[in-house]
């Protein structure tokens, strides 16, 4: 699975996940640091990437719009508030655990899911 971190996800976690072999980009590395959420989601759709964010309100509405319009998209993963934004290691552990549990299968295609701290159900 390919991921896209938005501005609400710790940038350092992106590099660490890449070192673990995860195909992940950060909006700051692809010229989208100042893009609005619609632009971020459109890029994710074009690049077949799951958006990872803490921006619950805006991306929940965008998921609803995509579903209402019948548009296909890779999905949106929300980092749980219990995962500290100041702890990139927690981001890495949580995402690696989620990827491992799903073994290359995308359970959130055309929808959204929650990334709970590693060791909890999602």
Image: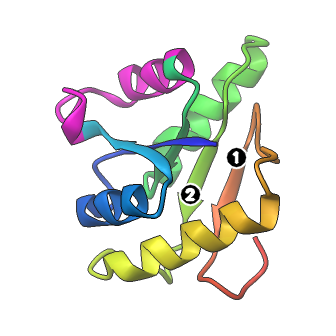
Quarter of the image that includes the N terminus: top right
Count of marks placed on residues: 2
Q: Earlier in the sequence, mark 2 or mark 1?
A: 2
| Residue 19 is at least partly visible in this image | yes
- Which picture quadrant has residue 24? top left
Label 2: few (<14), some or many (≥20) within 10 Å? some
Q: Tell me: residue 64, above or below residue 98.
A: above
Q: Secondary structure at mark 1?
A: strand
**Residue 68 placement (x, y as % from top left):** 76, 18
**Residue 53 placement (x, y as % from top left):** 45, 52
The dot on residue 112 is 1
**Residue 39 placement (x, y as % from top left):** 37, 20
Residue situated in front as seen by the camera: 85 or 13:
13
Majority secondary structure of the magenta segment?
helix
Left or right: 22, with 63 as reference point? left
The dot on residue 78 is 2
Q: Residue at x 49, y 55 (%)?
A: 21
Please state the extent of the stretch shown in magenta in the rendering.
Answer: 28-46
Magenta stretch: residue 85 in it? no
Q: Residue at x 28, y 49 (%)?
A: 7
Q: Tell me: residue 1, above or below residue 118.
A: above
**Would you say the residues marked 2 and 1 are in contact, meaning their CB atoms lie under 8 Å apart?**
yes
Left or right: 1, with 21 as reference point? right
| Residue 84 is at least partly visible in this image | no
**Residue 78 placement (x, y as % from top left):** 56, 57
Q: Residue at x 58, y 69 (%)?
A: 96
Left or right: 66, with 102 as reference point? left
Q: Residue at x 47, y 40 (%)?
A: 58
Quarter of the image that includes the C terminus: bottom right
């Amino acid at each position: 699975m390919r991921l896209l971190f938005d501005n609400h996800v710790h940038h350092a976690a992106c590099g660490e996940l890449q070192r673990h072999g995860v195909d992940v980009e950060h909006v700051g590395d692809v010229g989208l640091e100042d893009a609005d959420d619609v632009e971020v989601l459109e890029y994710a759709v074009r690049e077949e990437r799951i958006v990872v964010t803490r921006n619950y309100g805006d991306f929940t509405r965008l998921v609803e719009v995509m579903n209402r319009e019948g548009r296909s998209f890779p999905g949106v993963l929300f980092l749980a508030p219990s995962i500290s934004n100041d702890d990139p290691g927690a981001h890495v552990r949580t995402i690696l655990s989620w990827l491992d549990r799903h073994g290359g299968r995308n359970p959130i295609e055309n929808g959204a899911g929650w990334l709970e701290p590693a060791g909890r159900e999602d």
